[in-house]
Amino acid sequence: MQEGENCIGCSSRRVEITEEEIKKIFSKTLKIKGVKLVSEETYRQRIEKCKSCEYLEFGTTCRQCGCIVEIKAKLEGASCPYPYNSKW
């Protein structure tokens, strides 16, 4: 992230999250009625693209939408917010 550039999903300049926090958030996501997940293969394909994206910050956060990619990539109805051309 360049100096003065904020994540679109929050007001702070640095957003770091632990693996434990990601698991806690995801467990809450699973409690939402009707949430559908993609297959493990689709998840791996999506996360691979996220991990190589220039908008990934700290290995966890998408600067385009502010999401935690390890959670968003698991959700069936989610899509990549890459500008003008979704990567998945």
Image (spheres, rainbow, N blue to C red):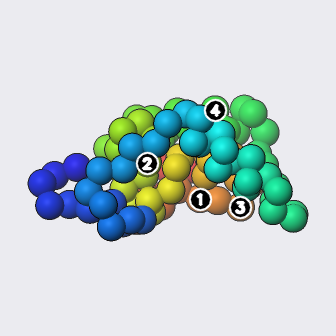
Residue type at the position of mark 1: Ser
In the rendered structure, which amino acid carries the disc numbered 2?
Thr
Bin the neighbour count of mark 2 within 10 Å (Cα to Cα): few under 14, some 14-19, many 20 and up: many
Within 10 Å of the Cα at label 3, are there few (<14), some (14-19), or many (20+) other Cα atoms?
few
| Label 1 neighbour load within 10 Å: few <14, some 14-19, many 20+ | few
User: Which element type, helix, strand or loop, lies under badge 3?
Assistant: loop
Whole-number angstrom distance, CA of label 1 to CA of label 3: 7 Å
Closer to the eye: label 2 or 3? 2
* Callout 1–callout 3 Cβ contact below 8 Å: yes
Contact, mark 2 vs mark 3 (Cβ under 8 Å): no
In the rendering, which numbered label is found on residue 77? Answer: 3
Q: In this figure, which residue is indicated by the disc labeled 2?
A: 61
Determine the secondary structure under disc 4.
helix
Q: CA distance from mark 2 to mark 3?
A: 18 Å
In the image: residue 77, left or right of residue 32 = left
Quadrant location of residue 47? Answer: top right
Residue pictured at 26% horizontal, 57% vertical: 13
